[in-house]
Amino acid sequence: MKSKAVLVFSTTHMTLKAEEILKNRKIPNMVIPKPESAKSKCGMALRIYEEDLTRVKDLLRKENIKTFTVLNNEI
């Protein structure tokens, strides 16, 4: 089974914007409830494959989504 990472954003808007960006680039992702360990007011997060993490981080930063936390081994 592939390892996964969770991206936690500060707002629901940013989470959904990131989901759309990744979907348009055909990068597998899933909106999930925010893990309890995450410190964010947003109740949602994105789960991605860990092997895509570097590409996703670079892509989101290019799209001006710079504020997010990466959690590994949460799901």
Image (spheres, rainbow, N blue to C red):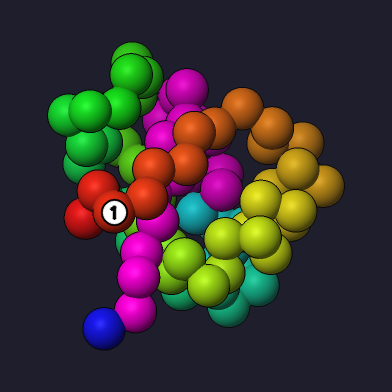
How packed mark 1 is, by other alpha carbons closer than 10 Å (few <14, some 14-19, many 20 or more), is few
Q: In the image, is residue 31 part of the stretch drawn in magenta?
A: no
Q: Is residue 29 visible?
A: no
Q: Foreground: 64 or 51?
A: 51
Q: Foreground: 70 or 14?
A: 70
The answer to whether 1 is drawn above or below residue 34 in the figure is below
Residue that mark 1 sits on: 73
Q: Which amino acid type corresponds to the residue marked 1 in the rendered image?
A: Asn
Residue at left 69%, top 32%?
Answer: 66
Residue at left 42%, top 36%?
Answer: 8
Which picture quadrant has residue 4? Answer: bottom left
Q: In the image, is residue 5 part of the stretch drawn in magenta?
A: yes
Q: Position of residue 25 (x, y in %)?
A: 65, 72
The answer to whether 63 is drawn above or below residue 28 in the figure is above
Q: Which region is colored magenta?
A: 2-18
Q: Is residue 48 visible?
A: yes
Q: Position of residue 48 (x, y in %)?
A: 43, 63
